[in-house]
Amino acid sequence: MKLETLVIHAGQHPDPVSGAVMTPIVLSSTFAQDGPGNHKGYDYSRSGNPTRNTLEACAAALEGAEHGFAFSSGCGATTTILHTLRPGDHVVCGDDVYGGTFRILDKVMKPMGLAATFVDMTDLARLEAAFRPETKLVWLETPSNPMLKVFDIEAVCALARARNVPVVVDNTFATPFAQQPLKLGATAVVHSTTKYLNGHSDVVGGLVMSSDAAFSERLRFLQNAIGAVPSPFDCFLVLRGLKTLAVRVQRHSENAMVLARWLEAHPDVARVYYPGLESHPQHAVVKKQMRVPGGMISFVLKAGGDGDTAARSQRFLSALKVFTCAESLGGVESLIELPAVMTHASIPAEIRAQLGIDDGLIRISVGIESVDDLRDDLSAAFETSRGA
């Protein structure tokens, strides 16, 4: 089946008791056993739940994986994966990642003895030089957050495979509709379901999908032992959101392409970062590995009449009426944020400066509203924020 069909049907069957078409929400925390250890596949909801298992099966099908694991958040999924490693191990991570991922590696796992090197994986020579004998994992986001770099998944996986190092790809920005990293050689894929997979800004959750038997066995143990699992109701909401993933991501991408081209020609914009633009440094990789370029755009706002970029950025975001100034992304509504003081504030200022995450960098999650209304809203904010 094609992904457009899988999002609606994979792992989901009418309820055998009632015939309900939609997956029931099984809220029970415990399950009756016919005798000690003789149960029907479920004993305690942290270890397994029918609603959660349906979501896991559906998500696995979307990524072409054999196993799916649902978590209470994307950060919970990330932390559980990192617990497959041991003190003294080393992780090679993309230099441009979600601030929460950086915080987990640098502030949580580092004190526990896990080392990490952050490297620009658009330069394969730098990636190759970053490997150590103790390197046990490669982690990357593509497109990256918030600079929207695009890494060649197949090339990165080839370098890692030659060293027997597993690769985890955060596929949150792209979604399985745009790209499927497992088919390009990745060991596992991670998602924040909070974003596009749910798509309605009313759930916090995470997913991991893999076809690697040993990795999956270890992750299943850790999922149960650590316990960062989602509620059945949250699983139901993600399943409901998934049904429209294909049509939503298509519309997100179409709107984003229109806005990116318009922003690129706007006199108040210094630079636009969008994978769909021919000016994107990795546009050739985008065409090779992505079905659509996605709904995320970052751009650099020029300073206003007072020469103060930070002040103009604040005025710009405050002037918007259709876009909502908020963290997160991937919902049907358009969101806008200033990464330097919001999603990426946990990254040290000197590292943000190296990456280009300054007071003029603005990230937008393009929604599925009328693109004319979105463009008019941005245009008015440009005018209002110019200053003297």
Image (tube, grey):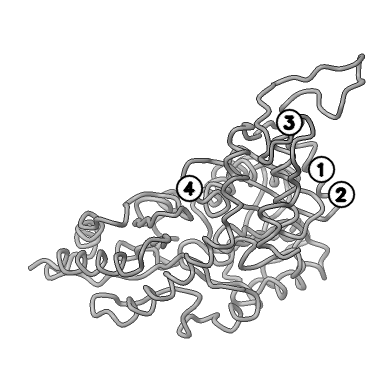
Mark 2 vs 4, N-terminal side: 4
What amino acid is at disc 2? Ala
| Residue labelled with disc 1 | 218
Q: Nearer the viewer, mark 4 or mark 1?
A: 4
- Separation of marks 2 and 3 at Cα, in angstroms: 37 Å
Q: Nearer the viewer, mark 2 or mark 4?
A: 4
Whether the residues at callouts 2 and 4 have beta carbons within 8 Å, the answer is no
Mark 3 vs 1, N-terminal side: 3
Q: Residues within 10 Å of mark 2 (few under 14, many from 20)?
A: few
Query: Nearest the camera: 129 or 83?
Result: 83
Whether the residues at callouts 2 and 3 have beta carbons within 8 Å, the answer is no
Left or right relative to 229: residue 34: right
Left or right relative to 282: residue 185: right
What amino acid is at disc 3? Ser
| Residue labelled with disc 4 | 200
| Residue labelled with disc 2 | 214
Q: What residue is rendered at 68% in x and 71% in y?
A: 153
Q: Provide the secondary structure element on which disc 2 rests.
A: helix
Q: Position of residue 28 (x, y in %)?
A: 69, 22
- Separation of marks 4 and 3 at Cα, in angstroms: 28 Å
Q: Provide the secondary structure element on which disc 3 rests.
A: loop
Q: Position of residue 218 (x, y in %)?
A: 81, 43
Q: Nearer the viewer, mark 2 or mark 3?
A: 3
Q: What residue is rendered at 73% in x and 45% in y?
A: 12
What amino acid is at disc 4? His
Mark 4 vs 1, N-terminal side: 4
Query: Nearest the camera: 22 or 349?
Result: 22
What amino acid is at disc 1? Arg
Q: What residue is rendered at 81% in x and 23% in y?
A: 43
Q: Position of residue 194 (x, y in %)?
A: 53, 46
Residue 18 has which mark? 3
Whether the residues at callouts 4 and 1 have beta carbons within 8 Å, the answer is no
